Image (spheres, grey):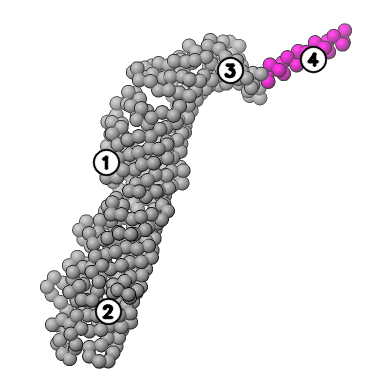
Amino acid sequence: MKNNFLKYFTLLFSVLVISIVYLSTVGIETDKFNDQIKKRVLLINKKIDIDLKKIKLTLDPFRLKIFAKTVGTTVYFAKRPLALESIKTQVSLNSLIKNKISSSNIELKTKSILLNDLIKFIRTTTNKPELLILEKIVKKGHIIIDLSLNIDENGKLKNDYIIEGLIKDGSINFLDRAIFKNINFNFNFQKDNYDFYEINFKTEEVNFISKKLNVKKKKNSFLIDAIVENDQSSLNSNILNLLNLNFENIIVDDAKFKTNNEFSLEIDEKFKVKNIILNSDINITQLKYKNLKIINKYFSEVDDIILLDNHKLNLNYKDKNLSINGGGQIQINTGEIDEIKYFINKKDKDLRIDSEIFLKNIVLEQQDFLKIFFPQANENINFNNHKLKINFNNNTLTFSGSGKFKIDKDFDEIDYFIEKNDNKLSF
């Protein structure tokens, strides 16, 4: 008798173990819960229709939960389809015994879909004008979304949703100011907080990368904070215009640059950009600057194009006020390489430049006002090893410095200050 009991017990236990293993790994398929899942989805929005395949049930024996999952589902809203990879929910064993799903969690995963198709689908659910603008600026891209939703006891959607996914090969024409392409990133969205990471994109043939970008919703606008950098790339005038560095005299032929940029800005629901704050560390291998006419008038041997080499600068932009601190090598005479430090400030049409230069050699063309002080001077005055400060503020230009100078045969020491304001000049 005991042997028979042991055999039956062993057989029953084996069947139970095999059943648990089978349910945990392979599972079973059924369509008996389809109507209940549709009702759960309708709690989110009554205008949603859903085409369900058979549901696969798998067991989690440690939490005494059944996972219900269906693959190849299509969701319809206003007859516009959206293809899903799967819908998944948790069901208690008690619910399964009662033949009723009572889960409060739904997980949806989309297939790879066109970004514009998703925007059009969302527009059918909420006809906000900013979605129309978004549809116009987004040119291409694919998106995959994993969505986790929780439903309260009254059947209403909770605010603790999590949306994760990725966008691949996106392209945006941002209000005709810039075209961003090859956009790739991962994202995690929660209520009023949106994180983007592992970002890379290209604009004006420059590749940019960012480990993370954060967007927070504040009333009717979005606050954006990010750190973006790029590897050494060719610099062009369109990049300068994008950064609001539209100096007329800058020439960027053959220039290479590398940056690390920390910025924040605000975008309202009509995609109007405001409150831009930018802090950038920039390395530029070479930059050319077309000389100011007023400098050529006094320094005739200065080249028409000033060459800047290996410059490191810090750029700050806030409230339409741009300031640049930097330094590096400068070539104002062919064959002569000198050192320069500078501060540039530009707001609207107002331009201020403060610079310090150590010059090995420069020639000042004789001026009428100088004949009062140096009547025996040659046609040109030579300067050697000069520490020179040049300040330009709109129409006012000043020079001050010290070093050696030669007005006839021999070099002497000199300290000087020259100011030019419109047609007035003082020495």
Q: Secondary structure at mark 3?
A: strand
Label 4 and label 2: CA atoms lie apart by 103 Å
Cα gap from disc 2 to disc 1, whole angstroms: 48 Å
Residue 381 drawn at (x, y percent): 22, 84
Q: CA distance from mark 3 to mark 4?
A: 27 Å
Question: Where's the C terminus, which quadrant?
Answer: bottom left
Residue designated by label 3: 57
Mark 1 Cα within 10 Å, few/some/many (few <14, many 20+)? few
* 392 w.r.t. 1: above or below: below
User: Which amino acid type is marked by label 1?
Assistant: Leu
Point out the stretch of residues depicted in magenta: 1-21
Residue receiving disc 1: 175
Q: Nearer the viewer, residue 343 or 208?
A: 208
Q: Disc number at residue 10?
A: 4
Residue that badge 2 annotates: 362
Work out whether mark 3 precedes mark 4 in sequence or the reverse, and give the earlier one: 4
Residue 13 drawn at (x, y percent): 76, 16
> Mostly what secondary structure, the magenta segment?
helix
Label located before the other in sequence (2 or 3): 3
Secondary structure under the numbered disc 4 in the rendered image: helix
Pick the front one: 201 or 198: 201
Q: Return the disc, 4 or 2, that comes first in the chain's sequence.
A: 4
For disc 3, the neighbor class at 10 Å (few under 14, some 14 to 19, many from 20) is: many
Disc 1 to disc 3: CB gap under 8 Å: no
| Dot 2 or dot 1, earlier in sequence | 1
365 lies above or below 93: below
Residue at (54%, 20%) from the top-left corner? 69
Labelled pair 4, 2 in contact (Cβ < 8 Å): no
